Amino acid sequence: MPVEIDIARVARLARIALTDEELEHYGAQLTGILEHASTVQGLPTEGVEPTAHPLGMVNGWRDDEPGATLDRDEVLAAAPDHEDGYFRVPPFLDE
């Protein structure tokens, strides 16, 4: 089943500036990924146990201890927009 995605819109929502060449490149990659996912969805999976990971895994728990954090001002300075110590993001509802 063909899958179409407006990669320019996705990039715009993610606030990622892409050139026309990058849009074409990533659009082709994303199309390939979605087509592969569509192929996998079509595989007969009756009788196959659901799993979250193909390999047996054991939880790697560790103690929850506070560690080094990033400096708030540096993080906010790297953000496209901020106000009163918070990130400002464009509204995404009602689009």
Image: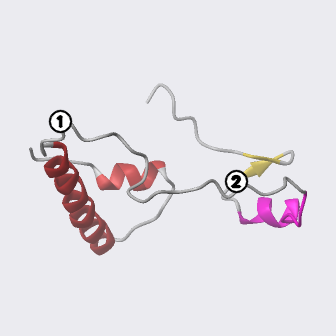
Q: Are marks 2 and 1 in contact (CB under 8 Å)?
A: no
What amino acid is at disc 1? Answer: Glu
Q: Is residue 46 left or right of residue 20?
A: left
Earlier residue among tags 2 and 1 = 1
Q: Secondary structure at mark 1?
A: loop
Q: Position of residue 63 (x, y in %)?
A: 84, 55
- Report the number of discs: 2
Asked whether 34 or 71 is in front, the reply is 34
Q: Quadrant of the C terminus?
A: top left
Q: Does the magenta-highlighted stretch encompass residue 76? A: yes
Please provide percent x and percent y for residue 16. 48, 61
Q: Position of residue 77 (x, y in %)?
A: 78, 64
Can you name the residue that lies furthest to the left here?
1
84 drawn magenta: no
Magenta residue span: 66-78
Q: Which mark is residue 46?
A: 1
Which residue was labeled with disc 2?
81
Image point (19%, 43%), residue name: 41
Residue in the picture at 25% in, 66% down: 29
Q: Quadrant of residue 67?
A: bottom right
Vertical placement of 76 versus 44: above or below?
A: below
- Above or below for 46 versus 39: above
